[in-house]
Image (spheres, helix red, strand yellow):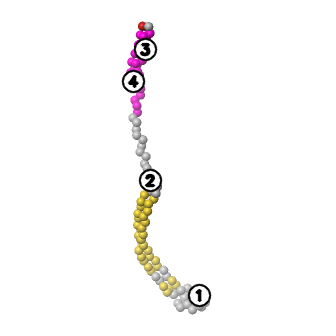
Amino acid sequence: MRGLRSYLLVTVSAAAFSTGALAADIPARMPVKAPAPVAAPWSWAGFYIGINAGVAWNRAEFTDLGTADGCCGYSFPRGTTFWSPSKAGFTGGGQAGYNFP
């Protein structure tokens, strides 16, 4: 029995003391890097408000074309410009709303 106990003690001691020697052969752990941050996709959701402004103008010319035979009692001779309005003005507006995601 004493031989079995000695054999067991030697085996357990050898196993216990050999783990320290094996630890030197373990490769060093690489540092763990955090994953790159992921940018959130752009979203048009939310409140918006806007304005627009501008100037509008026009120039028109109305000419009497008459008829080929000169009939029908036109009051202006053929080719006479009888009205030429020119207008200019301000135009503007606005908008507001909310876009849901």
Please, what is the three-letter code of the amino acid marked with disc 3?
Thr
According to the picture, the residue beneath numbered tag 3 turns out to be 11
According to the picture, the residue beneath numbered tag 4 turns out to be 24
Please, what is the three-letter code of the amino acid marked with disc 1?
Thr
According to the picture, the residue beneath numbered tag 1 turns out to be 67
x%, y% of residue 100?
Answer: 46, 57
Q: The residue tagged with tag 3: helix, strand or loop? A: helix
**CA distance separating discs 2 and 1:** 64 Å
Please, what is the three-letter code of the amino acid marked with disc 4?
Ala
x%, y% of residue 72?
Answer: 59, 91
Boundaries of the magenta span: 3-30
Q: Nearer the viewer, residue 60 or 100?
A: 100
Please, what is the three-letter code of the amino acid marked with disc 2?
Trp
Mark nearer the viewer, 1 or 4: 4
Residue 42: image tag: 2
Mark nearer the viewer, 2 or 1: 2
Let me know if residue 4 is in the magenta part.
yes
Q: Residue furthest front?
A: 1
For the point 40% across and 18% down, the residue is: 16
Q: The residue tagged with tag 1: helix, strand or loop? A: loop
Mark nearer the viewer, 4 or 3: 3
The image quadrant that residue 9 belongs to is top left
Residue count near mark 2 (Cα–Cα under 10 Å), binned few <14, some 14–19, many ≥20: few
